[in-house]
Image (cartoon, grey):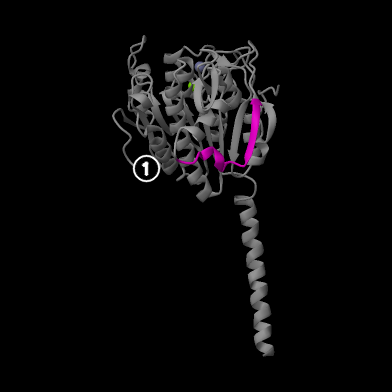
C-alpha cells in the first residue's frame, strides 16, 4: 500500500514535470501569438453589404462566427473619401496615404508591407483576388508605385515579390505589354508553376510556387458564372501554405463587391458578397481546427451608399419587403466593420484608424514595426 502510494507520488511528479515542460512549449507555440494570418478584404463591403448575407441566403452567415468586432475610420491624406489603393496601403503598410498610392506613403516613398516583412521572417505568402492580381487592393501588398494605374509595372514587381501562391486574373499585364517582355516566362524563372486554365491540384508541393492566372484582366462576375473560384482558391492556398511550419500570410480579396456598388446593381453586390461569405467560411473552418491562425475580415470602404430599405408600394412603406437602394455610384465615407477570430483577435475591438490594422497584426505576431513607417 505504502509502496503503491510512493510510486503514485513519483508518477504524479513525473506527470507534473512533463506538464510543466509541455505547457511551456504550448505557451510559446499557442500563447497569444498566431502562426498564420488570413486577411480577407471585401472591397466596397460596408455593414449593409455584410447584412445581405443575413437576408439573401438560406445558410447562416459566416459573419456570425466572429466574437471580436471593431470599426475603422478610413479617410486618406488627400481626400475625405478613400479609394482602394490608399485603403489597402493603410492595411498593408500602416501608412495613411493619398488616393491612388500603391505601397507608398504620401510623399510617394515606398514603405515595407506586412507581406514583405513576414516573408523576410520565413513565412510563406499568398494573394487571391477576383479582380486582376495587379489591381489596387492586392497590389498594395507587394508593389510600390505612385499610381494604381501602372498595371504593367505592378506586374513586373510581382514577379520579384516574395509571394508563393497567386490566384486571380491579370494574365495580360504579364504577356501583352508595352515593353514586349513576357513576364510569365519570368515567373517561371522565379520558380512558379503557372496555370492559365483552371484551379487544379491539392496539397501542392511546398517547394514550388503557384500562379493561377485565369483571366486576362478581371475574373468573371458571379452572375457570369465564376462559380466557386474564390472559396476553392482559398482552400487550395491554405492547404498549400499551411505546410510551412514557419507560418503563412494570405490576403484574399472579394474584389467585385465594389464593382456591383459602382454599377448600383444590387444583385451583383449580393452575389459577390455571398461568395465572399462562403470564402470566409473556408478560412474559419481552417482557423477553428488550427487554433494558431488569426483571421481578419474587413473592407477598404463602402461603395454605393447601399441601404436595405423597406419597400415602398403606392407611396406607403411596405415593411414586409426589402428593396436594396443606392445613394451614389461612388464610394462612401462610412466607418467600416472589422471582424477577427483567433489569437490576437481581441486587438481588433474598438474604433480606430484603418492603418491601425497593420500595427494590430504586427502586435499579434510580436513583430516590430518598420522604422520607416510613421504612425499617424
Ligand atoms: Mg479592390
Ligand atoms: Zn471602388
Q: Is residue 226 left or right of residue 301?
A: left
Whether residue 47 is visible here, answered yes or no, is yes
- Residue 158 locus on image (x, y percent): 44, 23
- Residue 222 locus on image (x, y percent): 37, 27
Task: Identify the residue under disc 1.
Answer: 205
Q: Is 265 drawn above or below residue 25 in the view shown?
A: above
Q: Which residues are magenta?
A: 59-72
- Residue 195 locus on image (x, y percent): 31, 30
- Residue 193 locus on image (x, y percent): 34, 33
Q: Is residue 325 left or right of residue 200?
A: right
Q: Is 262 drawn above or below residue 59 in the view shown?
A: above
Residue 71 vs residue 31, the one in the foreground:
71
Whether residue 135 is visible here, answered yes or no, is no
Q: Residue at x 64, y 19 (%)?
A: 96
Quadrant of the rendered structure where residue 364 is?
Answer: top right
Q: Is 99 drawn above or below residue 248 in the view shown?
A: above
Q: Residue at x 60, y 21 (%)?
A: 111
Per the image, is 68 magenta? yes
Query: Quadrant where the N terminus lies?
Result: bottom right
Residue 273 vs residue 293, the one in the foreground:
273
Q: Residue at x 64, y 72 (%)?
A: 14
Decide: few, some or many residues near mark 1? Use Cα within 10 Å; few <14, some 14-19, many ≥20: few
Residue 22 vs residue 364, the one in the foreground:
364
Q: Residue at x 60, y 50 (%)?
A: 30
Query: Quadrant where the C terminus lies?
Result: top right
Per the image, is 368 magenta? no
What secondary structure is marked by label 1?
loop
Q: Residue furthest bottom?
A: 1
Q: Residue furthest top?
A: 178
Residue 142 vs residue 232, the one in the foreground:
232
Amino acid at each position: 500500500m505504502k509502496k503503491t502510494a510512493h510510486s503514485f507520488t513519483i508518477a504524479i511528479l513525473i506527470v507534473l514535470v512533463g506538464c510543466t515542460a509541455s505547457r511551456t512549449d504550448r505557451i510559446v507555440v499557442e500563447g497569444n501569438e498566431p502562426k498564420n494570418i488570413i486577411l480577407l478584404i471585401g472591397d466596397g463591403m460596408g455593414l449593409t453589404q455584410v447584412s445581405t448575407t443575413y437576408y439573401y441566403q438560406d445558410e447562416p452567415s459566416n459573419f456570425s462566427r466572429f466574437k471580436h468586432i471593431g470599426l475603422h475610420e478610413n479617410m486618406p491624406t488627400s481626400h475625405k473619401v478613400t479609394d482602394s489603393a490608399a485603403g489597402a496601403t493603410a492595411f498593408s503598410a500602416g501608412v495613411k496615404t493619398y488616393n491612388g498610392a500603391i505601397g507608398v506613403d504620401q510623399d510617394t516613398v515606398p514603405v515595407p508591407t506586412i507581406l514583405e516583412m513576414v516573408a523576410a521572417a520565413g513565412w510563406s505568402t499568398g494573394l487571391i483576388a477576383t479582380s486582376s492580381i495587379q489591381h489596387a487592393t492586392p497590389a498594395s501588398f507587394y508593389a510600390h508605385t505612385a499610381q494604381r494605374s501602372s498595371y504593367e509595372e505592378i506586374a513586373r514587381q510581382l514577379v520579384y515579390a516574395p509571394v508563393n501562391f497567386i490566384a486571380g486574373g491579370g494574365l495580360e499585364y504579364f504577356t501583352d505589354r508595352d515593353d514586349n517582355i513576357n513576364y510569365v516566362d519570368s515567373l517561371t524563372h522565379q520558380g512558379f508553376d503557372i496555370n492559365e486554365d483552371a484551379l487544379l491540384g491539392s496539397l501542392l508541393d511546398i517547394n514550388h510556387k503557384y500562379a493561377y492566372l485565369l483571366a486576362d484582366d478581371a475574373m468573371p462576375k458571379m452572375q457570369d458564372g465564376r462559380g466557386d473560384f474564390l472559396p476553392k482558391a482559398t482552400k487550395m492556398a491554405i492547404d498549400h501554405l499551411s505546410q510551412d511550419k514557419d507560418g503563412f500570410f494570405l490576403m484574399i480579396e472579394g474584389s467585385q463587391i465594389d464593382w456591383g456598388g459602382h454599377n448600383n446593381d444590387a444583385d451583383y453586390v449580393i452575389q459577390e458578397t455571398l461568395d465572399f461569405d462562403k470564402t470566409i467560411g473556408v478560412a474559419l473552418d481552417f482557423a477553428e481546427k488550427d487554433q494558431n491562425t488569426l483571421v481578419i475580415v474587413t473592407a477598404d470602404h463602402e461603395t454605393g451608399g447601399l441601404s436595405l430599405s423597406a419597400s415602398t408600394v403606392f407611396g406607403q412603406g411596405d415593411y414586409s419587403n426589402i428593396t436594396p437602394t443606392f445613394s451614389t455610384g461612388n464610394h462612401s465615407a462610412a466607418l467600416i466593420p472589422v471582424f477577427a477570430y483567433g489569437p490576437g483577435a481581441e486587438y481588433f475591438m474598438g474604433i480606430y484608424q484603418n492603418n491601425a490594422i497593420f500595427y494590430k497584426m504586427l502586435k499579434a505576431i510580436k513583430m516590430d514595426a518598420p522604422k520607416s513607417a510613421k504612425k499617424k
